[in-house]
Image (tube, rainbow, N blue to C red):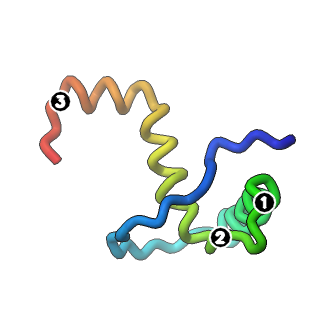
Amino acid sequence: MTKLKLSAIPDDKPVKFAIELPAPVFRDLQAYAAILARVTGEDAPPDPAKLVAPMLQRFMATDKGFTKAKRTACIAL
C-alpha cells in the first residue's frame, strides 16, 4: 500500500489565499488527490486546492530549521 504524508483532509473554516502555481505543480496536486482518494477509499478525489494547506502545514511542522527559528525568535502570531 502507498504511504502518503497526508491523510484525510480536515474540513475547517478557510482563510482566502490566492496563489498561482506552475502547471506541472497543479498536475501533481491532481495526481496526489487521485492517489489519496484511492488510498483512503473515497469515491472522488478531493479538490487539489484543499491539499495545499495540509501540505504546507506538514512541511512547516517537519522543517527543523523553521521550528528552531520560530521557537528562538518568539514570533507572536
How far is disc 3 from disc 2 in space, using C-alphas?
A: 36 Å
Q: Residues within 10 Å of mark 1 (few under 14, many from 20)?
A: few
Q: Which mark is residue 41?
A: 1
How far is disc 2 from disc 1 in space, using C-alphas?
A: 12 Å
Q: Which residue is mark 3?
A: 73
Q: Position of residue 2 (x, y in %)?
A: 82, 43
* Element carrying mark 1: loop
Give the mark nearest the N terminus, 3 or 2.
2
Q: Position of residue 69 (x, y in %)?
A: 28, 28
Q: Position of residue 41 (x, y in %)?
A: 78, 60
- Mark whose residue sits in front, 3 or 2: 2
Q: Is residue 73 left or right of residue 37?
A: left
Q: Which mark is residue 46?
A: 2
* Amino acid, disc 2: Pro
Q: Residues within 10 Å of mark 3 (few under 14, many from 20)?
A: few
- Mark whose residue sits in front, 1 or 3: 1
Q: Find residue 30 and report its image quarter.
A: bottom right
* Element carrying mark 2: loop
Give the mark nearest the N terminus, 2 or 1.
1
* Amino acid, disc 3: Ala
